Image (cartoon, coloured by chain):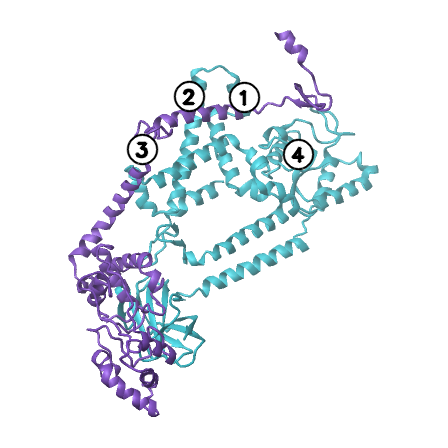
């Protein structure tokens, strides 16, 4: 046996290294084994892996997977860590639950807790429509300004979040802007006149169309939008004598709004967000603008 | 060695009165409070650039000293050398001199050997522990932490540092020693770039010492050099080099060979200074002189040789290299001093809120929102006034914690205040306007400002 091996042993001339005896097209493989320490580390990792299989979940089985003797799972770890977080929060949360909005406002630490929580909830749930900073867009109100369709106190905001607007909630804000033009309540000329009136309202004076429009407005619109377009929060009817226009303040947009009506929807967040979260979002939204 | 060790161990215990709101430790890196204190100087994380200045000063200072005096840093001030010297001193105190130690190493494990070795290593570990212990005092209030350590009531961080530094001191100074200089220290590798012919280096005087050879008492010194080849210089060298072969990378300029050689020279009644601090230029000059004098040299008594070389011993301090280093050192130093003296006690940072950039209000005005951070580095509570320049201010609301509107911006001593500011201006001209926030303290008349912009 040894002699056989000796016989096969062949030293490569150039490098002086023993060959393995493998040869391909005249190329001979040299026998340069991996370093001993490397081999040992490799073997140790194999042993380690076996230990790992025993201790931790590792192998798939037909019905699931091996559990490991410690019964460790990532789900448990997540639960433990969540419990720790809840534990840490609970001090604040208990206080938060026991306080009404005025009390929270009076306690800067508690207020910041609520506002920070509200910001996170807002960015996850509300930002899709209202924008990441609550800046809004056409059809979705800007929450940073001082114009509130349904009221801008924390309580008002909380209520709107809870019931939504034209949503499935029984107490939701249900009023909507009828399609005056399309529904045949106003002629196209009348719609145009009202739009002219509204665009020039802040200037206060205007031509014949303005005067005609004013007459139409007073007959058809003041019941919701109030005299002089002051708005009506009970109805959710926007102020029209300011420079904030949810659907655009140029004449064409206004004509479109009057012709086709508007009925933007905000879902009810009751059932989707916990009451804690809704109250926190209300505080956050209230802090964005000049909440009332 | 004692001076440097003394500074290291005692510095954290120095006190420096800074008033009620801040610690009174003279040198303290307060990581949790995010402050650095050095006597009258106080540094916030925002001012870490000052640290860069310190590092530049240290580096240039090192180059400067190296160009002037050779490897003085390595030989005298480097912690590695200082602690190695201390450890060697302990070793010698317990186990005797080098020969005794070698004998002890080779002997069997007798009880004597065991207790000597044990005492040595235990004292090393103790010194290491004290070193690590002193280190953590720089990061904590020393007396308080000392009490805590005595009562075994310290955090894992502190304990970890003490253990790590104990062990690193033990291994570095007890075992690695000069190997650190030879194999680990980058400075040893490039310092020869700082050397020139006028740098003070440890040098053997071959023209006086050679040809070397054993010398019998009473035999003549004629026709031979003064080196008696006793190898004292080689034996004492902590780096294990033979200085007679000239300057080598390993040499740390500790001067032990000089002392050893001077002892021997005194014993054989020859002038000292066969090995000494000297510059290469001096040596060259002397060599050419001795060549010129070579004809009459044989008859000359050794004393004249000594005078001869002493007269040649001069140092050119002012060289382009040293002057440049000195200039850099001076300018960086001045800049640092300037930065520290003019360091403002109030700083203002303003971030314009970007989501949304601006808000149009019902009456057509436009509102921008800003986040303000005010750094009050003074040791008193401050109440600032805020004003805005560059835009017509219709309304300026400052909201403190809890979104409470405030008139004055109250920032407690030695802390950072955060405020939200709402600025309302006319909405007629669209675009971006450069504005400036100005913060003033009505009491001290101090002010700070920050540029920002208003969008509409």
Say the numbered circle drawn on residue B363: none
Residue closest to the far bottom: A208
* Chain with purple colouring: A
Find out whether the residues at labels 3 and 1 contact each other: C-beta distance under 8 Å.
no
The vertical placement of B321 against B106, above or below, is below
Asked where in the image residue B126 lies, by quadrant, the reply is top left
Q: The residue tagged with tag 3: helix, strand or loop?
A: loop
Q: Mark 4 belongs to which subunit?
A: B
Q: Are marks 1 and 4 on the same chain?
A: yes
Residue density around tag 2, few if under 14, some if 14–19, many if 20 or more, within 10 Å: some
- Place of residue A43 in the rendered image (x, y in percent of width and height, measured from the top left): 48, 23
Q: Where does label 2 land, which residue?
A: B115
Q: Which residue is mark 1?
A: B102
Residue bearing mark 3: A72
Q: Is residue B328 visible?
A: yes
- Give the chain of mark 3: A
Residue situated in front as seen by the camera: A157 or B256: A157
Q: Nearer the viewer, residue A215 or B324?
A: A215
Report whether mark 2 lies on the same chain as mark 3. Answer: no
Quadrant of the image occupied by residue B118: top left
Going from N to C along the chain, the mark reached first, 1 or 4, is 1
């Amino acid at each position: 046996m040894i002699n056989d091996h000796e016989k096969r042993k062949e030293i490569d001339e150039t490098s002086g290294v023993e060959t393995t005896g493998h040869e391909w097209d005249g190329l001979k493989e040299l026998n340069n084994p991996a370093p001993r320490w490397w081999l040992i580390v490799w073997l140790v990792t194999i042993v380690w892996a076996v230990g790992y299989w025993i201790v931790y979940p590792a192998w798939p089985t037909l019905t699931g997977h091996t559990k490991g003797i410690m019964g460790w799972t990532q789900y448990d770890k997540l639960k433990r860590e969540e419990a720790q977080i809840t534990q840490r929060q609970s001090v604040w949360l208990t206080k938060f639950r026991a306080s009404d909005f005025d009390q929270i406002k009076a306690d800067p630490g508690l207020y910041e807790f609520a506002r920070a929580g509200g910001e996170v909830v807002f960015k996850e749930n509300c930002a899709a429509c209202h924008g990441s900073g609550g800046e809004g867009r056409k059809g979705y109100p800007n929450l940073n300004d001082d114009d509130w369709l349904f009221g801008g106190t924390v309580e008002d905001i909380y209520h709107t979040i809870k019931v939504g607007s034209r949503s499935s909630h029984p107490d939701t804000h249900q009023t909507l802007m009828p399609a005056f033009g399309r529904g045949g309540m106003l002629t196209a000329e009348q719609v145009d006149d009202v739009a002219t009136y509204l665009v020039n309202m802040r200037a206060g004076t205007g031509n014949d169309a303005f005067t005609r429009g004013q007459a139409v407005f007073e007959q058809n619109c003041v019941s919701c939008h109030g005299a002089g377009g002051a708005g009506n929060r009970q109805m959710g009817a926007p102020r029209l004598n300011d420079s904030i226009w949810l659907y655009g303040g140029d004449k064409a947009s206004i004509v479109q709004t009057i012709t086709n009506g508007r009925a933007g929807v905000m879902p009810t967040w009751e059932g989707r967000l916990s009451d804690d979260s809704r109250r926190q979002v209300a505080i956050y939204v209230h802090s964005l603008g000049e909440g009332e | 060695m004692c001076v440097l060790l003394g500074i290291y161990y005692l510095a954290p215990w120095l006190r420096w009165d800074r008033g009620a709101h801040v610690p009174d430790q003279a040198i303290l890196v307060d990581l949790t409070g995010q402050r650095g204190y050095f006597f009258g100087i106080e540094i916030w994380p925002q001012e870490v650039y000052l640290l860069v200045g310190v590092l530049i000063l240290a580096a240039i200072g090192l180059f400067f000293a190296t160009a002037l005096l050779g490897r003085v840093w390595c030989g005298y001030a480097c912690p590695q050398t200082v602690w190695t010297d201390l450890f060697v001193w302990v070793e010698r105190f317990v186990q005797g001199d080098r020969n005794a130690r070698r004998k002890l190493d080779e002997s069997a494990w007798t009880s004597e050997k065991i207790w000597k070795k044990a005492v040595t290593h235990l004292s090393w570990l103790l010194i290491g522990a004290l070193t690590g212990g002193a280190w953590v005092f720089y990061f904590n209030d020393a007396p308080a932490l000392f009490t805590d350590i005595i009562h075994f009531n310290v955090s894992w961080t502190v304990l970890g540092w003490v253990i790590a530094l104990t062990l690193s001191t033990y291994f570095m100074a007890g075992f690695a020693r000069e190997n650190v200089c030879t194999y680990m220290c980058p400075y040893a590798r490039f310092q020869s770039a700082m050397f020139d012919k006028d740098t003070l280096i440890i040098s053997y005087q071959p023209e006086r010492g050679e040809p070397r050879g054993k010398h019998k008492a009473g035999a003549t010194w004629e026709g031979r050099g003064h080196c008696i080849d006793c190898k004292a210089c080689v034996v004492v060298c902590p780096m294990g080099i033979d200085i007679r072969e000239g300057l080598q990378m390993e040499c740390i300029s500790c001067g032990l060979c000089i002392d050893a050689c001077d002892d021997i020279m005194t014993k054989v009644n020859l002038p000292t200074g066969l090995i000494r601090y000297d510059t290469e230029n001096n040596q060259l000059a002397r060599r050419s002189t001795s060549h010129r004098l070579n004809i009459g040299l044989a008859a000359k008594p050794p004393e004249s040789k000594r005078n001869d070389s002493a007269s040649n011993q001069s140092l050119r301090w002012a060289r382009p290299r040293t002057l440049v280093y000195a200039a850099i050192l001076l300018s960086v130093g001045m800049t640092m001093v300037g930065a520290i003296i003019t360091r403002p006690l109030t700083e203002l940072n303003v971030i314009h809120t970007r989501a949304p950039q601006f808000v149009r209000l019902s009456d057509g005005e436009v509102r921008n929102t800003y986040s303000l951070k005010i750094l009050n580095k003074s040791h008193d509570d401050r109440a600032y006034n805020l004003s805005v320049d560059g835009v017509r201010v219709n309304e300026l609301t400052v909201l403190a914690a809890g979104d409470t509107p405030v008139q004055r911006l109250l920032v407690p001593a030695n802390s950072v205040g955060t405020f939200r500011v709402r600025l309302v201006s006319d909405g007629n001209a669209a675009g971006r306007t450069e504005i400036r926030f100005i913060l003033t303290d009505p009491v001290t008349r101090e002010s700070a400002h920050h540029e920002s912009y208003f969008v509409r």
